[in-house]
Image (spheres, rainbow, N blue to C red):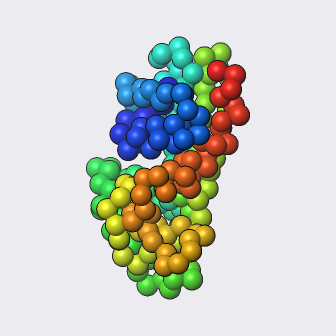
Amino acid sequence: MLATHNPHKVEEFQKIVAGARPGLQVVSYDGFAPVEDGVTFAANALIKARAAAARTGLAALADDSGICVDVLGGAPGVFSAYWAGHHKDPRANLELLLDQISDIADPHRAAQFVSTIALVRADGSESVVSGVWPGRIATAPSGTGGFGYDPIFIADGQTGTPRTVGEWTAAEKNASSHRARAFHALLPLLHGL
């Protein structure tokens, strides 16, 4: 069970899981939403997974993720969804981030998407894994794919003319993303469930 209220994460996880472990289903738990007051991705992922496992009696997964910009000391980080305020406006978040680093030259716009997945089993045991996707921040949004900061994130390792993740197909993103990297680290822990 995946503890999230974010339909984009549900869709992304379903595609990642289908590609990595055919037959495994992602069922989302969108009930009670605990207060995410942790100051790390791991703390917030554990808060959500613990709440879902306690309410359902089943093993639960939860992801906490965001974008970390080097020149901002790793911010927005755990505050990525709320960067422009508590109304969680993805476009406002993206525009504020671009404005904050508008005078920063390309070589200094390094950033990473980070995904941390917590697994809380029915017996109460816990595991936490992370996936990091390095890249840099574009100077302007491009593309309509993905969600959140995808239209301004240029992943490292591209050949040819680099594209933002907003210009990638869902299949391309799901093969390389921070969430895919974290899930692949989690796969060995799922075999005993």
Number of callouts: 0
Q: Nearer the viewer, residue 183 or 116?
A: 183
Tell me: 60 left or right of 87: right
Residue drawn at point x = 31 percent, y = 62 percent: 144
- The image shows residue 119 at horizontal and vertical percentages of 61, 31
Tell me: 95 left or right of 130: left
- The image shows residue 49 at horizontal and vertical percentages of 53, 29
In the picture shown, does residue 50 fall above or below 41?
above
Residue drawn at point x = 59 percent, y = 40 percent: 20
What quarter of the picture does the C terminus occupy?
top right
Tell me: 87 left or right of 149: left
Q: Is residue 75 visible?
A: yes
- The image shows residue 25 at horizontal and vertical percentages of 49, 27
Residue drawn at point x = 42 percent, y = 38 percent: 10
Residue drawn at point x = 47 percent, y = 17 percent: 55
Q: Quadrant of residue 94?
A: bottom left
In the picture shown, does residue 144 fall above or below 189?
below
Q: Is residue 36 visible?
A: no
Tell me: 145 left or right of 53: left
Q: Nearer the viewer, residue 158 or 40?
A: 158
- The image shows residue 1 at horizontal and vertical percentages of 50, 26
In the picture shown, does residue 31 fall above or below 62?
above
